[in-house]
Image (spheres, grey):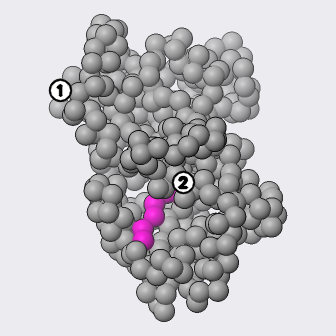
């Protein structure tokens, strides 16, 4: 435990911490499953350890971050703070103290490289990160090709209002889906094998590898999240055969659409739009405040926002189809900053910033970005 005037810093390594999960799941906008102890347990099977840093003022918990780290064969460890840090009060000293503590913890644990991927764009957080020696990775250093923007639906609206926020063609196709004879249900652990097979079909069509790369990872996620009510699997079927499936996190007041699979069957019956609409209704009826579709291309989203004409270059972008599809459901676009990085050795950091522009233009970097979902 460390004390800074009226602030207190607590550092913990316990594998289970229900208070941690309860606190971050109660945050209005910044609760995220990747900051949960459940996610730390999933990643433990890949060699990652977790350390959690809390900042309190008196008895009030104001800020925190869960950092996963693992040992390299040589040269110390690497660390990552995914979808964090989080804090309750803007422009409060707690975040300043938290970032200072993160750097101290990294030094104590000999973590030579720390990457931070905040959940959403925040000028105040970005400025503090720069003050504490963090810099944008330019998608050359890991993590590569992280989510740069997303679309969030406000579920406080009524169903009719949500429908009116959608593209007219999307509303028309939802009506077709509702009359098509397709059925919608919740899935269970046994359905994960089918989800993975449908994911493989989507990945093959995009000429990509599925992420995660095995059904065992999904089973681990299920075993750690589902018993606590933090995960749901939804299935659209045609005569008992799954044709479209979605795996969502239900952590906090936000439903996050994490993984999706489609058999490419029954396309005229609009199974994917039925999946989205039924998920939206389920989330709303179960008291969730937002639905996050998780990933869109910010370049494409901005292009449409400005009303610019569609070009061949735009259509050639990897996420063109998914972005257009997701935007047709309405919602608010959120951009993410980062990823941000910091080397413990400032000489290495300065050298990277000098050569980063050249590295970003090299073919291997572009290939890496194209294979990560």
* Residue 320: numbered disc: none
Say which of 9 and 164 sits in front.
164
Say which of 364 and 141 sits in front.
364
Q: CA distance from mark 2 to mark 1?
A: 44 Å
- Measured along the vertical axis of the image, is residue 370 above or below residue 326? above
Residue 224 visible in rendering? no
- Secondary structure of the residue carrying numbered label 1: loop
- Measured along the vertical axis of the image, is residue 89 above or below residue 275? above
Point out the image quarter for the N terminus.
top right
- Measured along the vertical axis of the image, is residue 116 above or below residue 152? above
* Residue 324: numbered disc: 2
- Secondary structure of the residue carrying numbered label 2: helix
* Residue 74: numbered disc: 1
Q: Residues within 10 Å of mark 1 (few under 14, many from 20)?
A: few
Nearer to us of marks 2 and 1 is 2
Residue found 38% across the figure and 39% down from its top: 145
**The quarter of the displayed image where residue 360 is located:** top left
Q: Position of residue 359 (x, y in %)?
A: 26, 22
Residue found 49% across the figure and 87% down from its top: 238
Magenta-tinted stretch: 257-262
Report if residue 260 lies within the magenta region. yes
């Amino acid at each position: 435990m460390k004390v800074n005037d009226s602030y207190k810093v607590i550092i913990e390594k316990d594998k289970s911490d229900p208070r941690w999960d309860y606190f971050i799941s109660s945050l209005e906008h910044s609760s995220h499953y990747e900051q949960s102890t459940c996610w730390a347990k999933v990643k433990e099977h890949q060699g990652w350890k977790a350390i959690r840093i809390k900042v309190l003022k008196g008895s009030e918990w104001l800020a925190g971050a869960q950092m996963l780290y693992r040992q390299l064969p040589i040269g110390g460890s690497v660390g990552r703070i995914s979808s964090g840090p989080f804090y309750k009060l803007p422009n409060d000293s707690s975040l300043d103290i938290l970032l200072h503590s993160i750097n101290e913890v990294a030094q104590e644990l000999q973590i030579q490289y720390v990457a931070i991927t905040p959940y959403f764009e925040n000028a105040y957080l970005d400025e503090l990160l720069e003050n504490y020696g963090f810099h944008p990775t330019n998608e050359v250093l890991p993590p590569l090709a992280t989510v740069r923007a997303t679309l969030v639906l406000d579920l406080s609206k009524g169903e009719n209002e949500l429908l009116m926020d959608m593209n007219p063609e999307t509303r028309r196709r939802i009506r077709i889906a509702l009359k098509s004879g397709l059925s919608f249900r919740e899935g269970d652990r046994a359905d994960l094998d089918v989800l993975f097979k449908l994911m493989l079909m989507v990945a093959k069509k995009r000429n990509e590898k599925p992420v995660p790369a095995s059904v065992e990872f999904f089973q681990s996620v299920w075993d750690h999240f589902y018993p606590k009510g933090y995960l749901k699997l939804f299935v659209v079927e045609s005569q008992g055969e799954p044709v479209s499936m979605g795996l969502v996190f239900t952590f906090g007041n936000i439903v996050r659409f994490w993984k999706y699979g489609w058999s490419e069957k029954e396309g005229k019956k609009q199974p994917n739009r039925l999946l989205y609409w039924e998920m939206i209704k389920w989330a709303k009826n179960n008291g969730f405040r937002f639905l996050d579709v998780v990933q869109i291309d910010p370049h494409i989203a901005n292009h449409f926002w400005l009303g610019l004409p569609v070009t061949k270059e735009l259509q050639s972008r990897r996420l063109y189809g998914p972005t257009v599809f997701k935007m047709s459901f309405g919602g608010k676009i959120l951009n993410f900053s980062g990823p941000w990085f910091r080397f413990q050795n400032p000489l290495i950091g300065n050298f990277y910033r000098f050569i980063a522009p050249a590295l970003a233009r090299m073919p291997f970097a572009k290939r890496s970005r194209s294979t990560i979902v």
